[in-house]
Image (cartoon, rainbow, N blue to C red):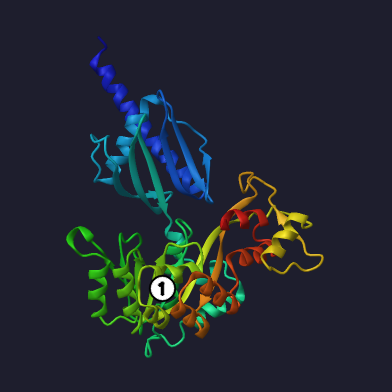
Amino acid sequence: MSDPKEEDGAIDQDSTEVEKLVNAILLHAIKVRASDIHIEPFPGESVAVRYRIDGVLAPGPFGVPGRLRSLLNAKIKIMTGVMDITERRLPQTGRIQVLVQGNPVDLHVEMLPTLHGEACVLRVLDRASLKRGIGELGFLPDTFEKLLALFKGIGGRRAPGLVLVSGLAKTGKTTTLYSLLDHLKRPEIKIVTVESPVEYELEGILQVPANPGLGFDFTAALRSIRRFDPDVVMTGEIGDAGTAELTLKTAMSGLVFSTVFTEDAPSAVSRLLEMGLEPTLVAAALKAVLAQRLARRLCACRKPCDPSMADVLVFKEHAAPLPAGAKLFEAAGCGSCGGTGYRGRIGLQELLIMDDGLRGACLRGGPEALRAAARNTGMRTLVQDGLQKALEGLTSVREVLDSTF
C-alpha cells in the first residue's frame, strides 16, 4: 500500500497542474481570438482541445494528460459556481467570469455526457466586440447610409417600425443589435431590452431578463415594457406567432429591434406571414430587414490575382459588377494569421427596406412575389455584397460562397 502522504502530495500536484492547464487553455483562446473552446473525450484517456477561430475549428497546441481528464471538468464546474461536480449523466449549463492578463472574460459553459465521458464547450463572450461602433461592422458606404436613415427622428416623433436582424446561428446578430442600440443611445431616448439570457450588460440601457420558468416569457415581458414608455425596444429572437404579433403591435408606436432565424431578408418577411400573422399588420409595422453572414477577412499577407473563369461566372451568375482589369485577392498565410491567410471576420449584409411594392407583395402573399418586389427595390443581396468586398480585397470569392451557401 502506498504512503498516504505520497497520495496527498500527488493530489495536490494534480490540482496545481489542472489549474495551470485551465489557465493555459484560456490564455491560448484569447491569444488566437477563439470564439469557442472544445474539450472532447475520446476512447481511453485521450482528450482533445480545439478552438473555433474565425468560424473554423483548429486543434490546440497541447493535449490533456489522461489523469487530469476528470479533474479538468471538475475544475471548470467548480468555477461556474452552479454545476454539480458529481453529476456526469446529464447536460449542465453555467457561466464563468475570469480575469485573463488583467482583462475580464465571460465564458458560457456547456457540459454534455458522451460515450467516453463528459465533453465541454466554453463560449468566449467577447465584451470588446460590443464596443465596436456600427460603422466598424463592415457595411458598404451606401448600405450604411440607408441603414442610418431609418433611425432619423427617433425620440420626439419616435420613428415607429420593426427592424429585424436576420441570419443563421453565430452570424453576429447580437453584436449588430447591440451596436445599433449603442448608436441610438442618447439622454432623450429610453431604450429597453428583453433578453433570455442577458449575456452582456449595456450601460445606459434597461435590460429585462425573461424567465419562462416563472411565467415571465418574452410575451409577458413585452406587455410590461409597452407600459414603460420606451422609445426603443429590443427583443430576443421571434420564435412563435404570439411573440411575433405582439412585437409588430409594439412597433406601431415605437422603434423595435428583434431577430429572426432565416437565410436572407426576403425569407424573414415570408417567415412572419407563414406564422399566420395578418398581412396588413406585417405590411404596416415592418420597417426593414437586415440579413447578415460572417466571412473570414483576408490577412494583410493576401496575394492579388487575376479573376479565374470560375470567378467571372460567379460574378455573372449573381449580377455583380466585375470591372475590366479588376484584381481579386487570395489567401497566402503568415505568422500573424497562423498560416491560414485569414484574420478576423467581416459582415456580409443585405438590407431590405419596406416600400409600397413590398407592402403590396405582403398583402398578395407568396415568397416569389416578395423576392421579385425585393429585387425591384435595388436591394444588394448577401452574395453581391460579399463579391463587392472581394473586389476591395477584404475577403475572397471562395469565402463569400462558403459563407452564403
Kind of residue at disc 1: Leu
Q: Dot 1 corresponds to which residue?
A: 181
- Is residue 180 positioned above or below 37 on the image? below
Secondary structure state at the residue bearing disc 1? helix
Q: Is residue 133 visible?
A: no
Question: Residue drawn 25% across and 45% down?
Answer: 81
Toward which corner of the image does residue 9 lie, by quadrant? top left
State the residue lying farthest toward the left.
214
Depth check: 326 or 94 in front? 326
Front residue of this view, candidates 307 and 41: 307
**Does 226 appear above or below 385?**
below
For residue 382, which quarter of the picture?
A: bottom right
| Image position of 122 with respect to 360: above or below | above
Q: Nearer the viewer, residue 348 or 48?
A: 348
- Residue at screen point 68% across, 68% down: 319
Image vertical order of residue 267 relative to residue 354, above or below:
above
Q: Quadrant of the C terminus?
A: bottom right
Task: Name the image quarter holding the N terminus.
Answer: top left
Instruction: Kindly identify the residue that appears in the image at 36 percent across and 30 percent down.
Output: 115
Residue drawn at (27%, 11%), measured in percent from left and top? 2
Q: x, y (%) of residue 321?
A: 72, 69
- Residue 308 screen position, x and y as percent: 77, 55
Task: Give the residue furthest to the top.
Answer: 1
- Position of 373 compared to 92: left or right? right
Residue 178 in picture, x, y percent from top left: 42, 68
Crowding near the residue tagged with mark 1, few <14, some 14–19, many ≥20 C-alpha atoms within 10 Å: many
Whether residue 401 is visible to the viewer of this picture, yes or no, is yes
Q: How many numbered callouts?
A: 1
Q: Where residue 268 sits in the image (x, y, percent)?
A: 45, 68
Observer-nearest of 36 and 201: 36
